[in-house]
Image (cartoon, helix red, strand yellow):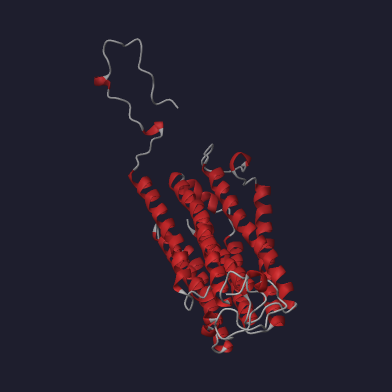
Amino acid sequence: MSTHTEHAHDPKAEARVYIVTLVTLLILTVITVGASYINFGSGNVVIALTIATIKGSIVALFFMHLRHDKPINAIIGLTGFLFLGIFLMFDFIDVGTRTNPQPINLHAPPAATAPANAPATPAPDSRKE
Amino acid sequence: MSTSTVDLHPEHPHGPGPHGDAGAHEHDPRQQHHFTTMEQQFDTSKIGMWLFLATEVLTFGGLFAGFGLMQNRYPQEFVEAHEQLQRLAGALNTVVLLVSSFTMVMGVQAARNNQPKKTARYLWLTVACAGIFMVVKAYEYTHKFEEGLLPGVFYHHHGDLIAGSHGYATFFSFYFMMTGLHGLHVLIGMILLSWLAIRAKRGEFSDKYYTPVDLVGLFWHLVDMIWIYLFPLYYLIT
């Protein structure tokens, strides 16, 4: 099997790569925990997710062997993330462009525009839940 | 091409190369008749596993999206609720899972290099790490149960700053759904790894055939990867 022969190099060297990978992941974990104690405002989310993505990529490339694997496997895996990205993108567009529809944020109509001919029967109160 | 009946008989594994490749390799009894070579069989299994992993990414992705949307709706409550999680417990579990990924990949390597005892040892180590993860998780869950930090209508924690808000209950709905589903994956992984460790001890895996170890390894690394995202989102982001 070609996938086997690709791995036929020195097992000791390979184990060293795995150890370096593990140590890198542990260092990144320490960094991300440390960064969470410092307040960067909205930067905290960006830092945490960037480090998580770096860690995830390292796991995929080294532990999941995508580095040496047939490209089709990486393509399939990335397709999952691609469609997740499309999904998240539309979610964020929705959140970013939507005005909050909760009743408490609706403004009462100005008094001048209120119908003058019906003072005894107020319009149904749209502010009530 | 030989007929399938011939292929299905493992007592003829050393017959003349039935696939016209001039006996470049023996016919492995584990090779199924619809595959031309063991390599093709291995690659096909792997593609199937990756397709499954892609659906896993989407499953958890949907939950992450929901979490993000609710965090947008209840930003203050989510920050306060997240303070109830023990950062150190989460960090410990992250380390445990990363180490388990390392022992897993060493197990795959040992299986590929014809070291059945070493394979079994690394697989059991991986199971042990998963066990530690679950124990820490159980400790965290017990603490949440006692505090009334429960999902949805079961939420009855006292002392929240915004009285009557659904934000806290929503946070813990997502917390238990996502860590619970992840924990279920860890449990399934433990069962699969134990099964593989027993098979490895029997010497069932070698450089000729280690597909199950490789595929469960991929699954295990994905479980690790999901936690890599769960941990900062739940325990770290304020």
Image quarter of residue B198 = bottom right
- Does any portion of residue B6 appear in the rendered image? yes
Q: Is residue B181 left or right of residue A75?
A: right
Q: Is residue B129 above or below residue B182?
A: below
Identify the residue at horizontal 46%, vertical 65% (top origin).
A76
- Does any portion of residue A54 appear in the rendered image? no
Q: Is residue A47 left or right of residue B184?
A: left
Count of labels in the image: 0
x, y percentage for residue A73? 48, 69
x, y percentage for residue A43? 39, 61
Q: Nearer the viewer, residue A13 or B166?
A: A13
Looking at the image, the residue that sits furthest to the left is A112
Identify the residue at horizontal 75%, vertical 77% (top origin).
B202
Q: Is residue A12 above or below residue A42?
A: below
Identify the residue at horizontal 56%, vertical 86% (top origin).
B22
x, y percentage for residue A79? 43, 62
Image quarter of residue B129 = bottom right
Q: Nearer the viewer, residue A43 or B98?
A: B98
x, y percentage for residue B185? 62, 60
Identify the residue at horizontal 52%, vertical 78% (top origin).
A21
Q: Is residue B207 above or below residue A80?
A: below
Indicate the quadrant containing the N terminus of chain B: top left, top right, bottom left or bottom right.
bottom right
